[in-house]
Amino acid sequence: MKRRDFLQRSALGSGGLVLGSYLEAATAAETIAKPAGAPALAGFKPNAFISISNEGVVTLISKQPEIGQGIKTSLPMVIAEELDVNWKDVRIVQGDLDSAYGGQSAGGSTSTPNNYNNFLRLGATARTMLLQAAAQSWRVPVGECQAANSAVQHKASGRSLSYAELAAIAATLPTPSAESVKLKDPRDYKLLGTRIGGVDNLALVTGRPLFGIDVRLPGMLYAVFEKCPAFGGKVLSANLEAIRALPGVRDAFVIEGTAELRGLMPGVAIVAESTWAAFSARRQLKVNWNEGAVVEQSWDSFAAQAQKLSKQAGTVQLRKDGDPAAAFAQASKTVQASYSYPFISHASIEPQNCTAWFHNGAMELWAPTQNPAAGQNLVADTLNLPKEKITLHITRSGGGFGRRLSADYIVEAAAIAQRVAAPVKLTWSREDDLRHDHYRAGGFHFLRGALDGKGKLTAWHNHFLTFANRVTRDGASVLQPGSGASLSGDEFPGRWVANCLLEQTAMECGIPMGPWRAPGSTVFAWVFHSFIDELAHAGGRDPLEFRLELLGKQELVAGSGERGLPYNVGRMRRVLTEVAQKADWGRKKLPRGQGQGIAFHFSHRGYIAEVAEVTVSKAGVLRVDRVVVVSDIGSQIVNLSGAENQVQGSVIDALGTLMFAELDIQRGRVVQRNFNDYTLIGMSDAPPRIDVHFVKSNEPVTGMGEPAFPPLAPAVCNAIFAATGKRVRQMPLSRTDLSWS
């Protein structure tokens, strides 16, 4: 039974309240594709984001794509706080791609830091105008008026006017100067920092249509797109006539595509009257492919190449401080290790999809995208359409993790729609999603560390073997490392070690790569903090003490490897000592098979430290019993419920990635096909306890979608070592025998 059929039948048998919810959902399916926007009858619209109707409904535009990170709730909360509106009066509308909204993307945990201050001012400006409207109505000084709970009060006279009553007057007033708009003292916040449920929660749990895959338009057709299983392959021939003759099929044709690895790839499109007809016809499609040169590439060949190149100097020297060679020669103890991790998929639960309608010379798109402007630009450039002729409606995404920053699925739908005189919804299968992803790059790190007689780190050497695609830039062919697959010379602990050598060598590959949740940080944190743990134990040091010594006491260290921001040592020391205290670090002796591990990382402006507590059976079965997380993401938590959710989700996602995620590359293609051979974490593997703590600092507010992810893997692997004496130097965990006796 389909999920929505189940919900419908359950609703019919369980009373009016649920029935009403379901019937509303049924009609909403036909309206999801309508352009979003503020109500036409708004009485007061001070800017592109706020409108207040004469009935008192406050509509706030959420401009950023919602991919599960909660931004559709949290950013409007920022406006609502300064607007002094009752949250119950607020209606949130997802904004389409519109230059009036400024930048619209969800990636790098930037939605909050890029918009927070501006949104405070938007709300405060509207509140100021409502106060002025009330003062004008009462003929009193505006300083005697106060806003609260969607109304303005004049305490001296006891009078009050609701925002609904003031909307028409406020609409006639000029926008106040920036100097006259006063922001609230954060100590007076009533909404920010509280727990607010997601605005889509009811729709999510009752199965209402919200996602790109839910879009329906009158007369819509359905499409699938078959691409070469080997990356970069092209169509030689296909049984198109036989496919066109199948029941429900309207057309089948070849799309030549472009040479761009992350653009419109060559393939065969099938357009049908239903998704079922399109998928059924695809099973009978026979294509002869020119598989190209990438067919010679495999993970095993990359691993062998990395081992060979590791014995040579890196092609790029990222950093050299002091005299590493002399420091290693004089060391009391030298430790070396190699770490590796595979390519992995984003595996978002909603496969890629897009609905496109080419009519009257214009392209209209409905897409679950993280970067709508990139989709518009790619369609314009690839199909030679003016950008002003491309409208893009942003739907909710069923997960993204960086995958939907790319726009290949959008341009595929648009290219198909150009050939069809009707709206067309392109839906990828799960197999498409796994085999034509833009993957997190694999990598190999060859590390050495030197310790003096007191167990202090005196030298650090990392030779990073990474992956790069060949691209054309300014007319020249160059190798470009994948997103998050290039090491910065500023990454911890590079700057902190007096004698440091960081090298990088890029191996050319034809596998498309893209940003993957906490790009770079997600793997670098595991490598660095696992090896730091090795060095601590080799020097007979407590891992916490060793890390604090490494950090030092200098408050700021210039450069961080991330956006050129300085590294605030004080903030990191605080979360590190706090997490140790919360987790009772080292306060009790644990039996063999149980252990604690600690790690931290600065990622996407957030300072995060984590302690993992694990149990490993003698047979090698891992159970993560508890994870303690302490985060410093600035001066204000916007939505406490959403922030906790993001930390918990990061911990579980990171654990699943550590335990299971792995793609094998053979003959230029991904071997895995579906979730039966690409395992995701299940409830039985999730930690039963995740303790979430926040510490506030006087620093700008930042996002929470990514920072808590990176420290989890090293904390767990360090705990495994404490429990068993076994080091994990290869992802996923399934490649390491954890059994002990």
Image (spheres, helix red, strand yellow):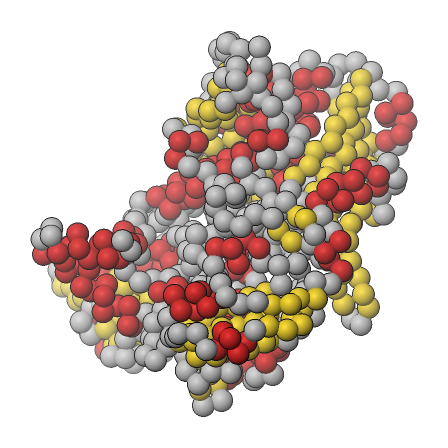
Instruction: Identify the image quadrant of residue 489.
Output: top right
Residue furthest to the left: 15
Q: Compared with residue 344, is residue 435 higher up or lower down, i.e. above or below? A: below
- Position of the C terminus, as image quadrant, is top right
User: Seen in the image, is 415 located left or right of residue 690?
Assistant: right
- Whether residue 197 is visible to the viewer of this picture, yes or no, is yes
Question: In this orientation, which residue lies closer to the viewer: 8 or 19?
Answer: 8
Counting from the top left corner in percent of width and height, residue 161 is at 17, 66
Counting from the top left corner in percent of width and height, residue 120 is at 41, 59
User: Seen in the image, is 514 located left or right of residue 17?
Assistant: right
Q: Residue at x 54, y 81 (%)?
A: 387
Question: In this orientation, which residue lies closer to the viewer: 449 or 563?
Answer: 449
Question: In this orientation, which residue lies closer to the viewer: 170 or 68?
Answer: 68
Instruction: Identify the image quadrant of residue 129.
Output: bottom left
Q: Which residue is drawn at 47% across and 82% down?
A: 420
Q: Compared with residue 689, is residue 468 higher up or lower down, i.e. above or below? A: below
Question: In this orientation, which residue lies closer to the viewer: 213 or 702?
Answer: 213
Instruction: Identify the image quadrant of residue 212.
Output: bottom left
User: Seen in the image, is 404 located left or right of residue 141?
Assistant: right
Q: How many labels does the image show?
A: 0
Residue furthest to the bottom: 360
- Whether residue 143 is visible to the viewer of this picture, yes or no, is no
Counting from the top left corner in percent of width and height, residue 47 is at 38, 73
Q: Residue at x 67, y 17 (%)?
A: 537
Counting from the top left corner in percent of width and height, residue 390 is at 50, 80
Q: Which residue is drawn at 66% across and 60% down?
A: 231
Q: Compared with residue 101, is residue 548 higher up or lower down, i.e. above or below? A: above
